[in-house]
Image (tube, rainbow, N blue to C red):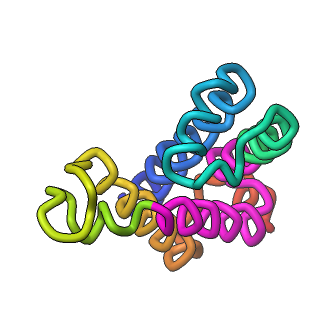
């Protein structure tokens, strides 16, 4: 049951990272709009989207498959933590009652992605359905 649970966590968190990477690659205008609104335009631009999107797809695929686990699991954790920082006000105040400017309940699941990434790392020895585990790495 542990191995299957970790496999499902890897697939869901890795695929989600890949999907947002694909948004950067295929729908740059959407990625730029998100960047402009929540990141102050810091990660807007076609070249930035190409680089970050490509990296996201690669890291997401590595996580989903369980390849280069030390690198890929840590990279995913950092990616989700970095993505959470700019929306932290909405996490602390999801109803927009005190410090957030509006209600954004849809941002709260970002915490789940971060915590799932932590679980994947913490229980790596039970991650026996990964490519690395099958290869004995």
63 to the left or right of 101:
right
Camera-side residue of 128 and 20: 20
Q: Residue at x 78, y 44 (%)?
A: 58
Q: Which residue is drawn at 76% across and 54% down?
A: 67
For the N terminus, the image quarter is bottom left
Camera-side residue of 51 and 37: 37
- What span is in magenta? 59-86
Give how far across and how far down residue 120 sits, in percent.
52, 67
135 to the left or right of 115:
right
Camera-side residue of 29 and 9: 29
Q: Which residue is drawn at 51% across and 79% down?
A: 122
Say how many tags the image has: 0
**Which residue sits furthest bottom?**
122
Q: Where 75 falls versus 25 (above or below)? A: below
133 to the left or right of 137:
left
Looking at the magenta stretch, what is its main secondary structure?
A: helix
Q: Where 132 falls versus 49 (above or below)? A: below
Asked whether residue 85 is drawn in magenta, I would say: yes
Give how far across and how far down residue 128 sits, in percent.
59, 61
Give how far across and how far down residue 70 sits, in percent.
74, 72
For the C terminus, the image quarter is bottom right
Which of the 4 image quadrants contains residue 32?
top right
């Amino acid at each position: 049951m542990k191995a299957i649970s970790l496999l499902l966590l890897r697939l869901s968190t890795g695929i989600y990272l890949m999907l947002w990477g694909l948004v950067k690659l295929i729908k740059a205008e959407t990625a730029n709009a998100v960047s402009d609104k929540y990141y102050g335009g810091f990660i807007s631009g076609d070249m930035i989207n190409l680089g970050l999107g490509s990296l996201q797809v690669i890291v997401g695929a590595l996580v989903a498959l369980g390849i280069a686990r030390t690198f890929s699991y840590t990279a995913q954790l950092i990616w989700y933590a970095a993505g959470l920082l700019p929306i932290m006000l909405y996490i602390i105040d999801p109803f927009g009652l005190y410090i957030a400017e509006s209600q954004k309940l849809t941002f709260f699941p970002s915490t789940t992605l971060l915590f799932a990434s932590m679980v994947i790392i913490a229980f790596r020895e039970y991650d026996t359905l990964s490519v690395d585990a099958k290869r004995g790495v």
